[in-house]
């Protein structure tokens, strides 16, 4: 067991982990931050995406010990200061960008990373950026639309929801 | 103007906030004090005799609390088939036992034959590797055709055959159909495969069991689309736990698409283990485990013939299908290829002759059961592909040949040649709408533009009809169902006027928490935000048959309406008392009970309060409280229908197909929440396009699943799909349920595969590759390239 | 996963020592392939030595000789963002996996693994790159030795990769629809002394140079120059995503497209 310390959603946390403890397991089981989901075991589905030092990563494909000293943000850390939804989260609700909700945390974290890099992404840029996030419910239409809307683009021309 | 609340409004989904903030509560998110972990040991061979299992070393390993094998469950029941099908000769189907853990024999790769319970998951995994099982591998049978040959290896030795049943529908129509085809001026024949799919809800299956030795009560948290059915199956068939001692909770569930309808052995195992060790037992599938052990979908091999006049008038459809049921019968696997498939083989058409033959076949593969659409996509695909081929052969426009054969609006109710009574529909109007959506006039210009970039553009269309709102119990009972398919709801009006509605349907993405209150709010004239939906917990809900078959609103929603009607009826009694009027004179509108012809009225909230403070009630006439339950059993199926169009670009050098446009015009009858309905269609379209182009479940000849992870099973991703055009303005309300709704959950998946394939064939013909008349799904680049170059 | 110790040394020398201490030690790059493999219990290291905390193995720079030099533990995202001096290489990096994978996966990890469908081997072989390890320098032509096989010795780690910058180059990738690895992909680079063509995703032997195409393109750098050439499907990977013949065909189509798109 090794000692690990990091900042998660602005709070300092520390604990003992095994070498094999994945960041996703540390978040879910040790910190009980169960919003980070695990939907596959081949690093494909993206339900587990969190931000480590501001970059989107798959928490199921990184060891907890590798996040030593890092700033980690999970879906629980997304939101406005007064506990409301961020523009991305609000757009997902407004445009019905989620159904069962399981892929949603990863989608939101990936979308937030995209908008950080590209403030006004095109439809094609959004679809490309979502390559590592699988949704089985929405057919992606409303996710893409929500991200466009969150970036301040007019989506009224996109087929109605 | 779009409505801003109540029925017809695109109310924002109230469940979204918890999902968007990571506060959803899925089964694997639950942690119970003292929880332990289960790991299953699964067969690595497709067919083998278990000669011995030695668990001694495993049981002694660190952290191990218990080890189970099939022998531990030899004396309990099996997981049953929910529907009995009889063969054409009257023989009942073959029903080999499906045990909790494989015993004596393993029958598919992934078949669990042992399980370890340990303090941690990794300890359980270590111990699972230490179990020494001697399994004598035997030749596997994977191909259905070979499985039916004499001398084939048998999946179940005790039944002496791999054929589960040989079903004819409608057997009395067989001779007439044969004769009609023989005499027809034109017959188009097509052999096709409806490819096996893995449902792949993004949340893997998971279960957590808890046992209270003090009371003898069991609790099972599980990823289920219908917790009551799971409880019933465990209680009545598998473990014999009395229903009143077993609580099944399906909390937030991350998608189902059919795969979470069924009871699985893992649920029984964790319950038995929790009792044995006296601690909670938890199991969550890895995705790899899901691929091997979830019920798969589709997997039909079909020969279909369409007989028609030279002008395209349909005379007969005749199909012969082999349907793979895998190694064991799952709960609905015998209903899917029969009564959810054969009965739809007249499509939207006034064709006089239909005959369907289905042979269900056991193979050494994972069980196959209902997956989004369940039987109806297979029917639609066969029909709409062969119709497209016939139109091409006869030189008739593909929409025109369909129009010529539609059941006409004045023919409803219409009994189809496959035996269903369609209540309403207007298929011509759907095609009219579709044509407005797709800019057909601009197609040739788009085709030229594609050609200039070296691409072949094609347009494919199809229509569909489905039987949803599953299902009228009296009808399905006659047809072999072993359950009723009603649903139930309780409406509880609290003293302070807010409302809890307990529903038997289960929401795992469908938005029930938002849509159901819209119905109740309209009926009671109250704010929909004062209404809470309770679902997924057998201890809180009267009963329910769950969510599948596009049934939640049509069946459970109708139960909600009936229960709410009862609330209004009782409210009138109370109001009559409060207003000192005769009950017959009380009217209820917009949340006010009033005495007809007077200005005397009392609000719904005051009546609710009165119901719980009955100081002056005439108790012989009216009980205190305001809570009502209704069970609703539909009189018929509902019949959503639609017309779809797809435009593709094919890269002839690589074979890659790109979906450029997709338009869906659907008739769902009345629509409660258009936003949610559109979202349901989107998701179905993605799954249908995925089936048509991407998703490929491949077993090798030894029964190894080759496409066993997302590295080889191509899930549709955002960049595989376009924005869709969706319309549901054509509305012919269902005539036999109180909401006039038909259901929308499966439409997209049912209706989309044929138009994709039809579009690719159209593109290839436009490119001069006229020798290509059919390509089996999925139309991967390699398959399309091979077809072009064949 | 089996249990193991995870070490995160801060210097190359420490990493090398940790790796040489025990035969059961294994280097860990970004882990995007290794961690899924460990989850399947297909590997059983006693110790993983992470290379991602070593500053001297990070980053992209331009050498005096005009080579793009990339630290072995540099992520694909960093290469995509910072290898602008070699646009085809930056574009290749920007197309590996998905954004989250690119934020973890490293060039050294990819080259050391030498997956037959990976992208970086095509760039390295197609550019005639030099693989620098803690012990030596290996020419790309000597480095790739078949599917999942390289010239690296046990415990040897890639500290840097040096890419000579061509006049023109392009990487044309045809995605395997599920994994999004290359079903087949071709890296074409035109140097003053000739054209190099590297094909990945196709051969059972892993990445390879298509010498006939190189000769034809060296004489005439145009897609038409390939018209008389063809690759055999023999020895090509055949799986549920495509036959060997299909891959051989794709390699030719993609080579032509890469030539046309080369900048």
Image (cartoon, helix red, strand yellow):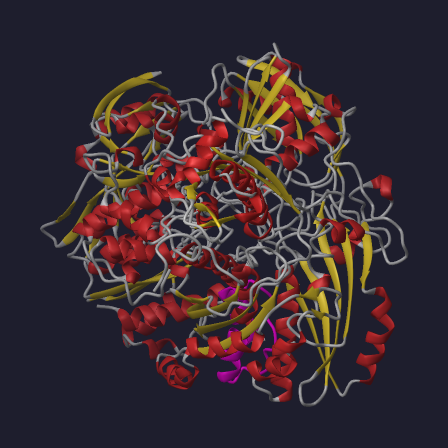
| Range covered by the magenta-colored residues | B759-788
Q: At which x and y percent is residue B473?
A: 72, 49
Residue B498 in sight in this render = no
Query: Is residue B266 depicted above or below A104 in this figure?
Result: above
Give B21 or C169, whichever is nearer the viewer.
B21
Residue B16: percent from left, percent from top: 37, 43
| Quarter of the picture holding the N terminus of chain A | top left
Camera-nearest residue between B88 and B9: B9
Residue situated in front as seen by the camera: C97 or B476: B476
Taking the image as drawn, is residue C83 in sight? yes
**Residue B354 rendering spot, x and y as whole percentages:** 76, 71
Q: Is residue B218 left or right of residue A4?
A: right
Q: Residue furthest left?
A: C64
Extreme residue toward the top, this view: B214
Q: Position of residue B634 (x, y in %)?
A: 66, 52
- Position above or below: C179 against B459: above
- Is residue B311 shown in magenta? no
Q: Quadrant of residue B648?
A: bottom left
- Reply above or below: B17 against B91: above
Q: Is B778 one of the magenta-colored residues? A: yes
In this view of the protein, which residue sits in the foreground, B169 or B520? Answer: B520
What residue do we see at 27% from left, 32% from top? C51
Q: Quadrant of the C terminus of chain A?
A: bottom left
Q: Does residue B444 appear to the left or right of B631 in the view shown? A: left
């Amino acid at each position: 067991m090794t000692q690990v310390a990091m900042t998660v959603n602005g709070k300092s946390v520390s604990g003992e982990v095994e070498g094999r403890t994945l960041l996703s397991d540390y978040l879910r089981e040790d910190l009980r931050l169960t919003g980070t989901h695990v939907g596959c075991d081949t690093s494909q589905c993206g339900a587990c995406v969190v931000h480590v030092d501001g970059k989107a990563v798959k928490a199921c494909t990184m060891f907890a010990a590798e996040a030593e000293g890092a700033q980690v943000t999970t879906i629980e850390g997304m939101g406005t200061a007064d506990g409301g939804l961020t523009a991305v989260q609000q757009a997902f609700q407004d445009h019905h960008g989620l159904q069962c909700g399981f892929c949603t945390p990863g989608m939101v974290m990936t979308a937030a990373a995209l908008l950080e890099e590209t403030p006004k992404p095109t439809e094609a840029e959004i679809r490309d950026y979502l390559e590592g996030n699988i949704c089985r419910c929405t057919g992606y239409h409303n996710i893409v639309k929500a991200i466009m809307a969150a970036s301040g683009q007019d989506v009224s021309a996109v087929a109605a929801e | 103007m779009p409505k801003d609340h109540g029925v017809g409004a695109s109310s924002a989904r109230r469940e979204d906030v918890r999902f968007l903030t990571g506060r959803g509560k899925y089964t694997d998110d639950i942690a119970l004090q003292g929880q332990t972990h289960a790991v299953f040991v699964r067969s690595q061979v497709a067919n083998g005799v278990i000669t011995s299992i030695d668990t001694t070393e495993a049981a002694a390993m660190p952290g191990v609390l218990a080890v189970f094998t099939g022998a531990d469950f030899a004396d309990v029941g099996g997981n049953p088939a929910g529907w009995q099908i009889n063969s054409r000769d009257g023989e009942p189907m073959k029903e080999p036992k499906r045990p909790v853990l494989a015993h004596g024999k393993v029958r598919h790769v992934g078949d669990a034959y042992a399980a370890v319970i340990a303090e941690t998951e990794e300890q359980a995994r270590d111990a699972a590797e230490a179990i020494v099982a001697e399994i004598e591998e035997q030749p596997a049978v994977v191909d259905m055709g070979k499985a039916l040959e004499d001398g084939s290896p048998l999946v179940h030795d005790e039944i002496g055959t791999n054929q589960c049943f040989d079903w004819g529908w409608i057997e009395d129509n067989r001779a007439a159909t044969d004769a009609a085809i023989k005499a027809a001026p034109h017959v188009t024949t097509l052999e096709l495969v409806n490819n096996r799919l893995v449902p792949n809800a993004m949340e893997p299956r998971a279960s957590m069991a808890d046992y209270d030795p003090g009371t003898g009560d069991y609790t099972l948290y599980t990823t289920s689309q219908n917790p009551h059915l799971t409880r019933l199956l465990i209680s009545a068939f598998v473990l014999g736990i009395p229903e009143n001692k077993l609580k099944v909770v399906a909390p937030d569930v991350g998608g189902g698409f059919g795969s979470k309808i069924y009871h699985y052995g893992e649920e029984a195992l964790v319950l038995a283990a929790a009792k044995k060790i006296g601690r909670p037992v938890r199991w969550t599938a890895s995705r790899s485990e899901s691929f091997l052990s979830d019920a798969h979908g589709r997997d039909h091999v079909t020969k279909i013939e369409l007989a028609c006049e030279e002008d395209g008038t349909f005379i007969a459809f005749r199909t012969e299908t082999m349907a793979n049921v895998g190694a064991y019968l799952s709960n609905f696997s015998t209903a899917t290829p029969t009564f959810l498939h054969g009965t739809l083989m007249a499509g939207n058409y006034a064709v006089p002759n239909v005959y369907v033959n289905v042979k269900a076949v056991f193979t050494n593969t994972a069980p196959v059961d209902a997956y989004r659409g369940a039987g109806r996509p297979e029917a639609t695909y066969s029909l709409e592909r062969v119709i497209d081929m016939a139109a091409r052969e006869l030189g008739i426009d593909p929409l025109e040949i369909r129009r010529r054969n539609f059941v006409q609006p004045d023919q409803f109710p219409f009994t189809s040649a496959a035996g269903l009574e369609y209540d309403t529909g207007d298929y011509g109007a759907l095609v009219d709408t579709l044509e407005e959506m797709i800019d057909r006039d601009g197609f040739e210009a788009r085709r030229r533009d594609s050609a200039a970039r070296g691409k072949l553009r094609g347009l494919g269309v199809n229509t569909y009809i489905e039987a949803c709102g599953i299902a009228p119990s009296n009808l399905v009972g006659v047809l072999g169902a072993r359950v009723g398919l009603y649903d139930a709801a309780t409406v509880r009006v609290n003293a302070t006027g807010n409302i809890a509605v307990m529903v038997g349907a289960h929401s795992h993405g469908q938005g029930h928490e938002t849509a159901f209150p819209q119905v109740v709010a309209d009926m009671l004239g109250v704010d929909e935000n004062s209404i809470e939906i309770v679902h997924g917990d057998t201890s809180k809900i009267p009963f329910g048959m769950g969510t599948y078959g596009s049934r939640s609103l049509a069946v459970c929603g109708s139960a909600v309406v009936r229960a709410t009607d009862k609330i209004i009826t009782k409210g009138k009694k109370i109001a009559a008392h409060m207003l000192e009027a005769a009950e017959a004179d009380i009217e209820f509108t917009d949340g006010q009970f009033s005495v007809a012809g007077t200005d005397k009225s009392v609000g719904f909230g005051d009546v609710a309060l009165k119901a719980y403070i009955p100081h002056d009630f005439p108790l012989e006439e009216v009980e205190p409280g305001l809570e009502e339950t209704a069970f609703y059993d539909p009189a018929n199926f509902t019949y959503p229908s639609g017309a779809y169009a797809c435009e593709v670009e094919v890269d002839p050098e690589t074979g890659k197909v790109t979906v450029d446009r997709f338009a869906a015009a659907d008739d769902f009858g009345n629509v409660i929440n258009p936003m949610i309905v559109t979202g349901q269609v989107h998701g179905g379209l993605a799954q249908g396009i995925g089936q048509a182009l991407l998703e490929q479940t491949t077993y090798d000849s030894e029964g190894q699943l080759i496409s066993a992870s997302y590295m080889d099973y191509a899930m549709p991703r955002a960049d595989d799909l376009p924005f869709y055009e969706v319309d549901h303005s054509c509305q012919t309300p269902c005539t036999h349920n109180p909401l006039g709704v038909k259901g929308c959950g499966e439409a997209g998946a049912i209706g989309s595969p044929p138009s994709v394939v039809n579009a690719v064939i159209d593109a290839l013909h436009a490119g001069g590759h006229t020798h290509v008349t059919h390509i089996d799904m999925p139309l991967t680049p390699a398959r399309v390239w091979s077809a072009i170059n064949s | 996963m089996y249990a193991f110790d995870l070490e995160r040394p801060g210097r190359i020398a420490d990493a090398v020592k940790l790796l040489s201490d025990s035969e059961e030690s294994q280097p860990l790059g970004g882990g995007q392939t290794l961690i899924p493999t460990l989850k399947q219990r297909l590997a059983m290291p006693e110790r993983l030595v992470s290379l991602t905390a070593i500053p001297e193995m990070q980053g992209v720079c331009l050498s005096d000789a005009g080579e793009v030099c990339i630290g072995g533990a540099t992520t694909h995202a960093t290469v995509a963002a910072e290898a602008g001096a070699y646009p085809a290489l930056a574009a290749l990096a920007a197309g590996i996996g998905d954004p989250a994978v690119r934020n973890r996966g490293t060039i050294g990890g990819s080259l050391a693994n030498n997956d037959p469908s990976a992208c970086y081997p095509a760039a390295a072989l197609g550019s005639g790159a030099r693989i620098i390890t803690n012990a030596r320098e290996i020419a790309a032509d000597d480095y790739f030795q078949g599917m999942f096989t390289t010239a690296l010795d046990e415990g040897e780690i890639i500290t840097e990769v040096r890419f000579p910058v061509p006049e023109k180059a392009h990487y044309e990738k045809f995605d395997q629809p599920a994994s999004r690895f290359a079903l087949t992909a071709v890296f074409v680079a035109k140097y003053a002394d000739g054209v190099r063509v590297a094909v990945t995703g196709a051969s059972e032997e892993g990445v390879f140079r298509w010498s006939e195409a190189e000769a034809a393109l060296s004489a005439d750098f145009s897609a038409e120059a390939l018209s008389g050439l063809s690759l055999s499907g023999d020895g090509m990977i055949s799986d549920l995503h495509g036959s060997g013949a299909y891959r051989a065909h794709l390699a030719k189509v993609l080579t032509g497209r890469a030539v046309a798109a080369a900048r």
